[in-house]
């Protein structure tokens, strides 16, 4: 009787070769797929020279890195002081978006939809054809941004959760009105008026311009 001991070894070798071939095919296909995925490009804006105090130089000399984002446009983030009179008190982030000039570039055009609270970022992102005509788009980078407290920029924070609940839903004591049949007496304006909003003063602490 003949015993064939080499058959299991040959099977293991065949499985090893098959696994190796499958791995090579998978890697090859992965490389082919990534060839069709467009890579994100980025450009850098060089700041213009400005004579400012040493405390403001980091903001005026910052370089904006523009990266591909929505609808073929480019986005960047700029830093600004929380308080311009005290640049060391903190900073906020401002979201910018631009559509690059489609022809011979002559400069950049900043657009602002107005407000308060209007998003210049979304204005360019969603409505650039409404904001500018084809001639401007051909010769200018169309740039929009969100001011502090708006949209994609650093939000305004006036209160913590408990303080906001008190501001929105807190009850101000008032004097009861006259009962039926009793003579009417004028109420004091201070007793019926709602609490004076403290928002502007409070927000100036955390979102100073």
Image (cartoon, helix red, strand yellow):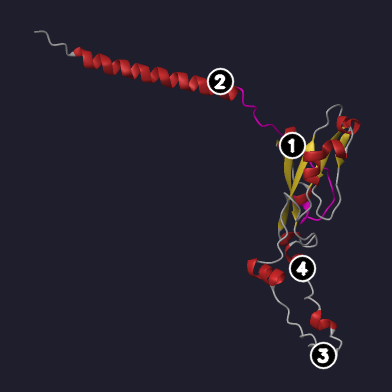
Q: Which residue is mark 4?
A: 199
Mark 3 and mark 4 lie on one chain; the one further toward the N terminus is 3
* Residue 198 location (% of width, % of height): 77, 71
Say left or right for 165 vs 103: left
Mark 1 and mark 2 lie on one chain; the one further toward the N terminus is 2
| Structural distance between the alpha carbons of marks 1 and 3 | 71 Å
Q: Which residue is mark 2?
A: 32
| Structural distance between the alpha carbons of marks 4 and 2 | 57 Å
Which of label 1 and label 4 is nearer to you? Answer: 4
**The one of 153 and 166 positioned closer to us in this rendering:** 166
| Structural distance between the alpha carbons of marks 1 and 2 | 27 Å
Task: Give the residue furthest to the top.
Answer: 1
Mark 1 and mark 4 lie on one chain; the one further toward the N terminus is 1
Q: Range of the magenta residues?
A: 36-58
Query: Label 3 neighbourhood size at 10 Å, few (<14), some (14-19), many (20+)?
Result: few
**Secondary structure of residue under mark 4:** helix
Mark 4 and mark 2 lie on one chain; the one further toward the N terminus is 2
Say left or right for 14 vs 129: left
Query: Label 2 neighbourhood size at 10 Å, few (<14), some (14-19), many (20+)?
Result: few
Report if residue 95 lies within the magenta region.
no
Is the stretch drawn in magenta largely helix, strand or loop?
loop
Q: Mark 1 near mark 4, Cβ–Cβ under 8 Å?
A: no
Q: Which residue is mark 1?
A: 74
């Amino acid at each position: 009787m003949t015993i064939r001991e080499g058959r299991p070894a040959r099977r293991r070798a065949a499985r090893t070769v098959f696994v190796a071939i499958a791995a090579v095919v998978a890697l090859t296909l992965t490389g082919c797929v990534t060839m069709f995925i467009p890579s994100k490009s980025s450009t850098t804006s060089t700041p213009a020279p400005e004579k400012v105090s040493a405390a403001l130089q980091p903001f005026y000399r910052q370089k904006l890195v523009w990266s591909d984002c929505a609808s073929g446009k480019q986005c960047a983030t700029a830093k600004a002081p929380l308080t311009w009179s005290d640049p060391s008190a903190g900073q906020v982030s401002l979201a910018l978006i631009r559509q690059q000039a489609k022809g011979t570039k002559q400069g950049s055009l900043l657009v602002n939809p107005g407000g308060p609270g209007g998003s210049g970022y979304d204005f360019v992102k969603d409505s650039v054809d409404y904001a500018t005509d084809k001639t401007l788009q051909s010769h200018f980078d169309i740039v929009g941004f969100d001011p502090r407290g708006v949209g994609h920029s650093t939000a305004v924070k006036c209160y913590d959760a408990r303080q906001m609940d008190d501001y929105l839903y807190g009850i101000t004591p008032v004097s009861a009105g006259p009962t039926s049949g009793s003579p009417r007496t004028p109420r004091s304006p201070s007793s019926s008026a709602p609490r004076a909003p403290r928002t502007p003063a409070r927000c100036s602490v955390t979102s100073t311009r």
